[in-house]
Amino acid sequence: MTDDEFFAFCRANDPIELERDKFGNIIIVSPTGSKTGNINLTLASRVFLWNEETNAGYAFDSSTGFKLPNGATRSTNVAWIQKDRWEAISEDQQEKFAPVCSDFIIELHSASDDLTYLQDKLEEYRENGCRLGWLIDRKTQQVFIYRPQQPVETISSFSQTLSGDDVLPSFAFDLALLTR
């Protein structure tokens, strides 16, 4: 399918969440459980509020698809794109699956997800230009942090605070919020 055909296919099959890998294979993304949905909203709201204060870019929810440079169309639980990069994309492209890789992403491992699949997805984002990615595994209370050209960092405790590094300056997320 062309990009426009895939976009139309997704619209025709709403509310099914669909992604497309770099080979053109269509992937059905299952909905999350209720608790995971609540935690997704907690994560997204913190990024949104930080962005409202800084006006540094644009935040996106889990239903947003982006066309990555490798040809894949992906969505993450939370995405953020630096202001100048988003505003360089035409209005028409913004209305569809914008051809841009997010600067920052969060994926939350839910009961319906395969961890290896999510790890591969974070690697794909990193390979396509993502500057910071968090893969949060509530079950094991681990966070895998992806940065360009660095080994994946593993945090093994939800008693820490994650930093937005230089990608989201002054942004911090207290992992203890995920245990309530």
Image (spheres, rainbow, N blue to C red):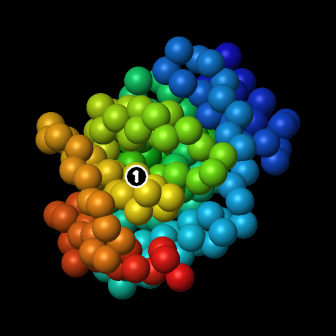
Occupied quadrant, residue 162: bottom left
User: Which residue is pictured at 14% across the width and 41% down the height?
Assistant: 150
Q: Position of residue 9 (x, y in %)?
A: 77, 30
Where does residue 165 sit, x and y in percent of width and height?
19, 65
Quarter containing the N terminus: top right
Q: Is residue 16 visible?
A: yes
Percent position (x, y) of residue 2? 64, 19
Front position in the image: 146 or 104: 146
The residue indicated by pointer 1 is: 135
Judge whether 62 appears above or below 158 on screen. above
Q: Which residue appears at 40% of the width and 52% of the height?
A: 135
Front-most of 48 and 97?
48
Please state if 78 lies on the left or on the right of 173 as rendered.
Answer: right
Q: Is residue 153 above or below residue 128?
A: below
Residue positioned 81% across, 47% down in the render: 15
Q: Is residue 45 above or below residue 99?
A: below
Crowd class of label 1 (few under 14; some 14 to 19; many from 20; radius 10 Å): many
Name the residue located 48 percent from the left edge and 74 percent from the top edge.
178
Determine the secondary structure under disc 1: strand
Amino acid carrying mark 1 in the image: Leu
User: Residue 173: horizontal and vertical position, in percent?
Assistant: 34, 75
